[in-house]
Amino acid sequence: MRLQQKNITQTLLIIVAILLANIILSSAFFRIDLTSDKRYTINDVSKKTIQQLDDIVYVRIYMDGEMPVEFKKLRRSIKETLDELQIYGHQYLQYDFINPMSGNETEREAFFTELTSKGIEPFTVQINDDEGGATQRNIFPSAIVTYKGKEKSINFFKYNEIFSPEENINLAYQNIEFELISTIKLLSRKEFPHIAFIEGHGELDSYATGDLEKELSQFYKTSRTTLNGKVGVLDEYKTVIVAKPQKTWSEDDKLVIDQYIMNGGNVAWFIDEVNVHEDSLANGEFTYAVQNMHNLDDLLFRYGARINADLIQDLQCAYIPVNIAAVGSQPNFQPERWLYHPLLFANYNNIITKGVNLVKSQYASTLDFVGSSKSNVQKVPLLQTSDRVKITKTPSIISLSQINDKITEIDFNQSFKTIAAVFEGNFESGFKNRILNKYNNGNPFDFTAESKRVKMFIASDGDIIRNDVVRRANRTISLPLGYDRYMNRTFGNKDFVKNIILYLTDDSGLLEIHSHDISLRLLDKEMLVLNRNRIILINTLIPPLIIIIFGIIFTLVRKRINTRKNKQ
């Protein structure tokens, strides 16, 4: 009787424990990611962004229908990420997959045109059929995100020629969360950081930076401003951009930007240390390369950077059109390599530049880090040349005839020269220990000798931020930043500069999402082809063989148990 009561008590305790556990677990939300690369772990910034939504975010992904297996896996990964985000966004995050190939040919063409006009970039793939044939097809590994009447496109797959196809797919896989969250965050932003382009020293005009300004204006409040030697005129701006100054900065204006930095402002410097008049080169045989007297060297040196008065020639370079016809003949322009237009590697290991394509530069100089190693400023290279570089001191003469010069390994014996870098820390004022009563138009001001922790970007080429401009009879057109009309290619300049601005203006740690490394385990196609019959045989025979062996073992064990029972 007591044993029966004890069993009943234990059973009731177990039932009560199970009920309590259900109650507790139903009110407490948690998820456990057991994958080695934490592929299902959502970043805290992503969770916060989704949880703060107050209206529906609708994501249309154009990846339905027939496509290669690699892109099917990318599609599945996008869906898995959206499903994970939905857990935190609840009803405010909705998505749908759309097949862009549906409809007749006329409807598809119209749809493709519409997608392209919205910034969606198609990617051509080869699809093999069962009979050994192959067809080419455009696929759209992209999406459009809509929020409160605003929309922005996402291109998940950005082909980078320095990576293999598998590495490009893996990179797209790693960037899914960042692309989605950065887009949602920008669309749902309630306050727009104020950004200013500095004018008054021969900087690039609004046409030469028109494509970038148009892009930034969707998510930032952008302005153009002059300094006029007035300390504090930049205080309202989160970040200021100095885009390729061609005239001398006065000491008064240098003090203005110096005190802006000392009081917490962030600056992106795009500086040409050497002036090269390419128009003169196009119209004649040669031009002179001379130092740009912008008067910013001492200020940048104090902040930890020295831009050298030299020019880089890189065997990894862009092409320019050159007239190879004889004098007096019909012009015959052919593309030729121009070593003064290096194609720069982005630092793959940095969250700012991870996955950014080659960046085109023009007449870039080398950038050195200076200052004590004990400095409170952290310096990280972001753009570098290839491993086959020649450095030319200035002043010098640049001639189109150099295209025909013989290239020798001895001349191109330098490698991986830094062109751009970020600096973060506590900077010392360039006006420390100087008499200041003659500045700020004679008006008193509070001088700050050392900054709080701020960010700075310095590039030794102003053309990184410049887009080409086409002038016609009735209008002026800004071409896309990074687009080379002679090579008909788009380089990574726009993505690079956008990431720099995001780094300088964003305090939420959005770029930290880029630090998440995920391995996409793709099949080895070559191995599959070579071992096709063996793989088919293994997959056909092994599963039923395992079941048969398991059945035999189970039968023998059961027979032995029954035999023992019968003997008892």
Image (spheres, rainbow, N blue to C red):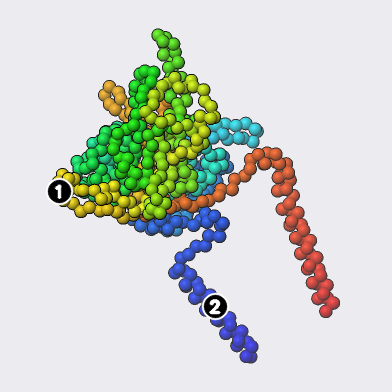
Q: Earlier in the sequence, mark 2 or mark 1?
A: 2
| Residue behind mark 1 | 443
Amino acid under disc 2: Ile
Using the rendered view, name the quadrant where residue 492 is placed.
top left
- The residue at the far top in this view is 328
Report the quarter where the N terminus lies: bottom right
Q: Is residue 437 above or below residue 212?
A: below
Could you tell me if residue 288 is visible in this image?
yes
Residue 422 image position (x, y, % from top left): 39, 46
* x and y percentages locating residue 203 in the rendered image: 28, 35
Residue drawn at x 32%, y 32% is 292
Q: Is 567 or 233 nearer to us in this picture?
A: 233
Q: Position of residue 227 (x, y in %)?
A: 22, 42
Q: Secondary structure at mark 1?
A: loop
The residue lying at 41 percent from left, 31 percent from top is 393
Disc 2 residue crowd, few under 14, some 14–19, many 20+, Cα 10 Å = few
Q: Is residue 102 left or right of residue 285?
A: right
Q: Residue type at mark 1: give it.
A: Asn
Q: Residue at x 81, y 68 (%)?
A: 559
Quarter location, residue 463: top left
Is label 2 in a helix, a strand or a loop? Answer: helix
| Quadrant of image for the C terminus | bottom right
**Residue picked out by circle 2:** 15
